[in-house]
Image: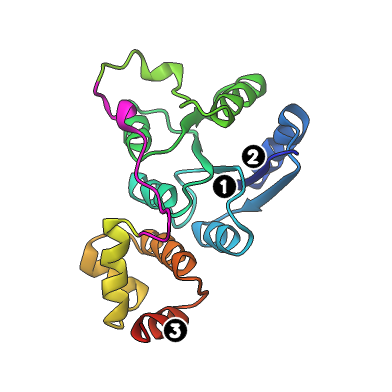
Amino acid sequence: MGIRALIADDHELFRSGLKQLLADSLGAEEVREAETLDQAIEILTNEGAGDLVLVDLRMPGMSGAEALAALRDGFPNAKIAVVSAWEERSEILAALSAGVHGYIPKSLSSAEIAGAIQTILEGRIYVPATIGRREPGSPVASAAQPGLTDSKLTLRQKEVLNELLKGQASKEIARTLDIAEGTVKIHLAAIYRALGVRTRAEAIAKLKSQ
């Protein structure tokens, strides 16, 4: 069976090209598209993460490594990778330390991008050559992060849930926890899925009935 993927990037031409690459080179069966973090969350929540999620760090709603870690926790069964035009060492290391499965520079050729994605799908971490040799104990080495399994929430998700139960809106939760609103939305999507609900009201009602 071909892979199911999601491309989250605000550049339509790049999405189109990457979608074609996934189909032609990797036999992708279904490739969905989003141009903002909110759209990506909606797709992931309603349709499932699938096998592969490719995200751009500069699309609307993204907040860097913080949002990547939330995606990794919220959708642990998918391979999540960054595809970005930014190649600063610090940014690459921050993304990898957040638990993503790879960081793919947009400057690579089509064949190189396909190879990088194949590496990720095979269960390995793709690190671009520009990062150089990493030392043992670097952030890349600790890329695996705890995921949401058996309906258990991460510490951050529990913090978001506590604020939710206080009646706080996403913006208020973001201010209280000092995180981006987009990151709050990712955590909420994971919380709803763990509880088997689809809305804030349903989540609060279910928790208060327990």
Residue at image point 69% right, 40% down: 3
Q: In the image, residue 205 lies at what x, y percent? A: 41, 86
Tag 2: Cα neighbours inside 10 Å, few (<14), some, or many (≥20)?
few
**Badge 1: how crowded within 10 Å, few (<14), some, or many (20+)?**
many
The amino acid at mark 3 is Ala
User: Disc 3 marks which residue?
Assistant: 201
The residue under label 1 is 9
Q: Residue at x 39, y 61 (%)?
A: 187
Q: Is residue 174 visible?
A: no
Q: Which residues are magenta?
A: 137-152
Question: In the rendered view, does 73 fall on the left or right side of 179?
Answer: right
Instruction: Please report the residue visible at 56 percent of the width from the left and 24 percent of the height from the top.
Output: 119
Asked whether residue 167 is in view, the answer is yes
Quadrant where the image shows the C terminus:
bottom left
Q: Secondary structure at mark 3?
A: helix
Badge 2 vs badge 1, beta-carbon distance below 8 Å:
yes
**Does the magenta segment cover residue 147?**
yes
**110 in relation to 175, above or below:** above
Distance (Cα) linking label 3 and label 1: 30 Å
